[in-house]
Amino acid sequence: MKRINNLCHNIKNKFGSIPLNLKIWIYFVIYTIIVFVLLWFFQIIFLENFYENMKINDVLAEGKFLAESYMADCFDESAYDELLNQSSMQNDMCIEIQDKYGRSVYSKKAFGDCIIHNRDGTLASLRSKLQKSQDGEVLYRGKNLRSSVESFIYGKVLSDGKKTYGYLFLNTPIQPVSSTVSIIKRQLMIITFILIIIAFMISIYVSQTIASPIVKITKSAKMLANGKYDVEFEGRGYLEAQELADTLTYAGQQISKVDTLQRDLIANVSHDLRTPLTMLKAYAEMIRDLSGDNPKKREEHLEIIIEETDRLTMLVNDMLDLSKLQSGKQTLHCTEFGISEKMHGIIDRFRGVSEKMGYHIHFTPDKERIVCCDSVKIEQVIYNLINNAINYTGADKQVYVTQVNLDDGVRIEVRDTGDGIEEDKIKLIFDKYYRSENHKREVIGTGLGLSIVKEILKMHNYDYGVNSTTGKGSVFWFTIKNLPHDDKI
């Protein structure tokens, strides 16, 4: 097998990779050759040895059984005589049982040239050997001088360990197997020729059947690699190939989605980066060319540059935060804190926005509850949800934040009064750069806020979601659960 593998390796180095169907055919042929070699080896070369060993084992087993039956307490003469008849006929054995004085008690003759039944002193000689043997048992190969027929001769002392009751003698011929070997050899030649043809045809069929789905999948995979993501993989023929085809089809669909998201991401990032960069350049040129000597105009232009820089910084920071969260490199630093106090602090930060732009953020707290989570990341979640509600709330500019204490945690809800989200778009709302079309004002933000919310809550293994009714607004919620205790202050 090692030589065959080396041969395949050399062929591979010379001509490249071996096709699957050819490799399967080669292994099938090798297997067939090994079967035939073993068949010839054991049926022809070792047949005589197998036959003689089988005869020896049969003689020993039958002799011990007949001796034990003779010495049994429930011995019955008529039943034992019938047992000897059956044994003699079935095993082609001559049987002789003598008493301790050498007188015949039972005698069964199965074939003509029985050595133990010849009157040439064979039994007397064998009895003498039994008396001298240590274990009271002898077995040897003998030859009838008259017929030249070889046979096995077995003798055993019938004794209970203390007293000798008689002797058991068995004689069975050894049939010559040379003629049998010749017949088997001819049959094997015919069978080998027929089976080689059948094996050759079956190996070609099997190799083609196994390789065909793989070849189709490979062709489809090349199309997938060239950007044809809607290609359908076919693996009919056997289960593993079909499972592989289904997996690759699913992978193609997912790659198509990722490719679309990547294109959208590049387009959105390019747009979001280009706008502030264009503004920065334009107002910098205005300061240089027009308002450099006008303090009031210069301050206005510098303020716009600062705002655009902050917007650019916010976009880059959100992209970095989302990248870190999705890479799995971020770790949680859980601490215990009061959620109501934290909520008040976050809402206070929006006071400037509320006063400047006319938004009203209403907070309905529950009793103070101590929670254990990453304070900084949960604060970012709440901040992003409120900022999202400000962007999409209705003309009344009302945002409602609610804390609801549950038996197993705290539920935070952020509700706006906007136009809501269509049911088929709800599952997309947490995707990168997805923005609902149901808004009438410019959206402030990077489009990554809800994606960051999703990743942070997934890290905490918290439940989250959105309930929305078209024309009535949306409620974004999440639950801080798995609290170590349920203290109330």
Image (spheres, rainbow, N blue to C red):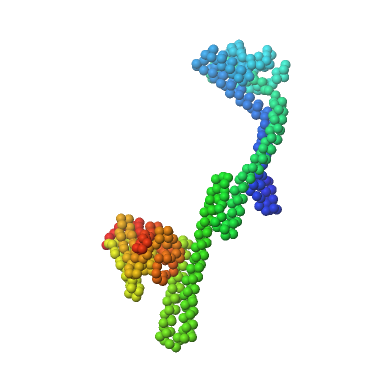
Quarter occupied by residue 369: bottom left
- Where is residue 302 drawn, in percent x and y? 43, 81
Q: Is residue 27 visible?
A: no
Horizontal side, residue 368 vs residue 7: left or right: left
Residue 145, how many percent across, how many down?
Answer: 72, 17
Image spot of residue 272 (x, y percent): 47, 71
Whether residue 293 is visible, yes or no, is yes
Task: Quadrant for residue 295, please give it.
Answer: bottom left
Which residue is located at x 45 percent, y 76 percent?
A: 309
Q: Residue furthest front?
A: 471
Q: Nearer the viewer, residue 400 or 164?
A: 400
- Residue displayed at 31% across by 57% down: 406
Residue at the extreme bottom of the image, as rendered: 293
Residue at 60%, 11% (x, y): give it.
103
Question: Does 30 appear above or below 475?
Answer: above
Residue 391 % position (x, y): 38, 69
